Amino acid sequence: TTVFVSGATGFIALHIVNDLLKAGYTVIGSGRSQEKNDGLLKKFNNNPKLSMEIVEDIAAPNAFDEVFKKHGKEIKIVLHTASPFHFETTNFEKDLLTPAVNGTKSILEAIKKYAADTVEKVIVTSSTAALVTPTDMNKEDLVITEESWNKDTWDSCQANAVAAYCGSKKFAEKTAWEFLKENKSSVKFTLSTINPGFVFGPQMFADSLKHGINTSSGIVSELIHSKVGGEFYNYCGPFIDVRDVSKAHLVAIEKPECTGQRLVLSEGLFCCQEIVDILNEEFPQLKGKIATGEPATGPSFLEKNSCKFDNSKTKKLLGFQFYNLKDCIVDTAAQMSEVQNEA
Ligand code: NDP
């Protein structure tokens, strides 16, 4: 079975590619340049079941047409992971919203044009950002479930970069569900979405840490580089290990019960205080060198400062245990310290 993975060079997607290959799938990935694609193929030891295509910018009209013109008849499953995830912009439409929405639209349009009879399943990597309005994140009594939607509009989500990113995930996911509704009779595929919280966990290849770090892993990296007595912003929200995010994509492919579902991936809430506590407790080389904040206050902080997530439906559908925060952070930080010591 051949699977197409958009944005294959990303933090989450590299784990997905690895798991797909291990499970025996043939994988076609897309990356933004020949150089990035060659680098990826080399990392996977030029595995003959893996090939790469260039999709330079998912914001461009018909961005995926060439790929599906060429491979449409082979591809049975499409995992759409590519989407901008960063906050370094003030042009929110151009850099976040438009690529997220256009990318989703153009991959589905390309399937309709060139692979309507062959693609059976599409899994879109959405986010908990599509479920909750950022300004509601601190509402202690709010419970978010698989049915929830971020209420921001195209305009209101442009208040700042974080809101715009969250909006980009909401509007991209909406685009996918609406496309399927409107095109039910002209395509064969079913749709599921994977909606992860903040994703931590080790990089598939440690050397990714040397070329600029992805946004969610950057949170852990900043805490590792915090200063004794220093302050840190106590980010909080649902978290999930990248290895579980990848596994969930494979389960979504393989378990028919996941068809048509939004799969919300969270093992619980985290806040940076809890991460700092884990770093100080588990890494003797960091103790006394990084911030401590107010140890052990994480759970009470979360109780009062964060909305709650009930993803029991997803946990039942997926049927596997997620990594807990301690194991996730220990594995993340161990890899980061190792790479640093080498440098
Ligand atoms: P990465 O930034 O590592 O991966 C994003 C991928 O999308 C990269 O391969 C990137 O390519 C590609 N991409 C971004 N913009 C464009 C564009 N305009 N044209 C073509 N390709 C593009 O982040 P993650 O792995 O963390 O994210 C993967 C997916 O998971 C995204 O959809 C993200 O929204 C979602 N997600 C992530 C969470 C997290 O905490 N990490 C939480 C919830 C959802 P390049 O690097 O070459 O620019």
Image: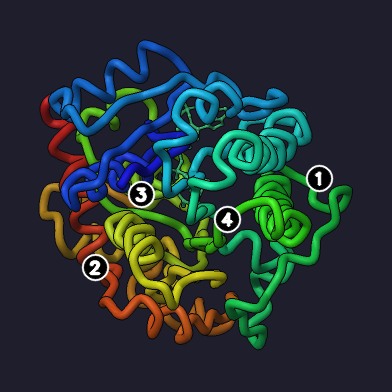
Q: Distance between the residues labelled 1 and 4?
A: 35 Å
Q: Distance between the residues labelled 2 and 4?
A: 42 Å
Q: Label 1, secondary structure: give it.
A: helix
Q: Which amino acid does label 1 sit on?
A: Gln
Residue 193 percent coordinates (x, y): 54, 61
Closer to the camera, 26 or 41? 26
Specify whether residue 276 is in view.
Answer: no
Q: Name the residue under label 3.
A: 220
Identify the residue at image location x=23%, y=41%.
Answer: 204
Give the quarter of the image for residue 143. Answer: bottom right
Q: Which of marks 2 and 4 is nearer the N terminus?
A: 4
Give the quarter of the image for residue 90. Answer: top right
Q: Which amino acid does label 4 sit on?
A: Lys
Closer to the camera, 229 or 202? 202
Q: Label 3, secondary structure: give it.
A: helix
**Answer yes or no: do the residues labelled 3 and 2 have beta carbons within 8 Å?**
no
Q: Mark 2 points at which residue?
A: 326
Q: Does the residue labelled 4 lie within 8 Å of ligand 1?
A: no
Q: Mark 1 points at which residue?
A: 158
Residue 181 percent coordinates (x, y): 74, 62
